Amino acid sequence: MIETPQHLVQTPSQTVGPFFGYALPYEGGAELVPGHHPAAIRLHGSVIDGAGEPIPDALIEIWQADADGRVSRERSSLDRDGFTFTGFGRAAVNLAGHYTFTTVKPGRIGEAAPYVLVTVFARGLTHHLFTRVYFPGDAALHETDAVLSGLAAERRATLIAVQDGPASYRFDIRVQGDDETVFLSFDEESTRG
Amino acid sequence: MTVEPQSTISAEMREIEADARRRVDAGGSPELHPRRDYAPYRSSLLRHPTHELVRADPEEIELVSPAFGHTDVNPLESDLTIQHTGEPLGERITVSGRVLDGEGRPVRGQLIEVWQANSAGRYVHKRDQHPAPLDPNFTGVGRAITGDNGEYLFTTIKPGPYPWKNHQNAWRPAHIHFSLFGTAFTQRLITQMYFPGDPLFALDPIYQSITDPAARERLLGRYNHDDSAPEFSLGYNWDIVLTGPKSTWMESEEAHD
């Protein structure tokens, strides 16, 4: 491949490692809206390895539209002023491998069923993983969603949160194993797993 | 758990690199990123997916990125040597460069976060058990927002190498962790910058998880004497290239940013 100013080759990924805890999490990072927001939901789950054990040192990021399907362009994604919805969240899992966000259920954008984009980082993961959280109330839209409709039923189920309370959704992330979560590649070339 | 010698890990790494080279010699593209399934890095064994990633067309949310601004980051946060009352111990350096996309366009106004060990190879993290001293004048965390040309500059201390428990006598080459956002969320990148000539490169399964030698070199900062400040600091340069899918979604406000 010829490297010219018009075509630069991307910088490779390296693992986030175990010691990001004092650097990347920030105050309010997991609260995209305050808990008392009338439309607040809990989005939570465990991150689990190929032996079924929780991963206690993962970092989860989410990025999503607001309840009306608008994508925020506010330039303050780390700043939590209590009013502005920026759509970005970051949470380190606890020692039991569990993460929790307070957010809103995203509205629909375009043809896709509503979803929250999820990025998983962890020690042992040399390159982050992307996945999406879809919501169980949108079953009709899932039939025509470009990603979900292309998956076998048991694989598709790994991308749909389970409602476990009036405003609570559980989304476990299994990075390896029989019920491994579907992870997505947005690159044009296929990516090695 | 058995503690394996470096020779076992090194033999595994050589075998995987030879396999990668054969694939390229047979006409395959060099692997740009590390392998997720890279057994010499033992923590990856149970933490890599075994299914192929599912190819998806990015939607609007994947083609834009969170926006960051000067209310998020104080400009002083890019100097890791002024966060305490005294001067940190070690070799003062600057690391500067540009964040670019695959077409060479600057990634402007985006967040860079860095974290690193101190000059003795110790992280300010409660789970770091390495018996090297903490430096009361060094935390090792910095943040910056890229400028109009995608540029950034951190002032810090050269981190030390440190031992870890992947295998017997395992040491990480000195590195600075970088976290980056592009203009599309698909460009999100967390990586590590290394220093040229480190004798630990050939022994380190995290660095070697990138099987292509040319790709590994993209993680090396370059010493630039012109960026060294007399009587003060040594200068390193490192440009970072974020690429993702070809974006067809145009941001209407782009011209105003």
Image (cartoon, rainbow, N blue to C red):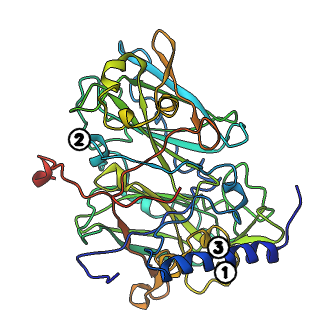
Q: Amino acid at mark 1?
A: Ala
Residue at mark 1 to residue at mark 3: CA–CA distance: 13 Å
Residue B105: quarter of image: bottom left
The kind of secondary structure element at disc 2 is loop
Disc 2 versus disc 3: nearer the observer: 3
Residue B16: mark? 3
User: Which residue corresponds to the image point at 46% horizontal and 84% vertical from the top-left?
Assistant: B222
- Left or right side of B151 for B138: right
**Residue pointed to by mark 1:** B202
Q: Is residue B120 visible?
A: yes
**Mark 2: few/some/many CA within 10 Å (<14, 14-19, 20+):** some
* Chain letter for mark 1: B
Q: Is residue B198 left or right of residue B187?
A: right
Q: Are discs 1 and 3 located on one and the same chain?
A: yes
Q: Tell me residue A74's x, y (percent).
A: 25, 40
Residue B234 visible in the snapshot: no
The image shows residue A72, relative to residue A23, as above or below, that is: above
Image coordinates of residue B45 in percent, x first then y, are 69, 54
Q: Residue at x 52, y 28 (%)?
A: A171
Q: CA distance from mark 1 to mark 2?
A: 43 Å
Instruction: Give the secondary structure at mark 3.
Output: helix
Q: Amino acid at mark 3?
A: Ile
Mark 2, residue position: A73
* Quarter assignment of residue B131: bottom right
* Residue neighbourhood size for the residue with mark 1, other residues' Cα within 10 Å, grouped as few (<14), some (14–19), many (≥20): few
Q: Amino acid at mark 2?
A: Arg
| Residue A33 position in % (x across, y down) | 38, 25
Mark 3 chain: B
Q: Nearer the viewer, residue B115 or A158?
A: A158
Above or below residue B155? Residue A37 is: above
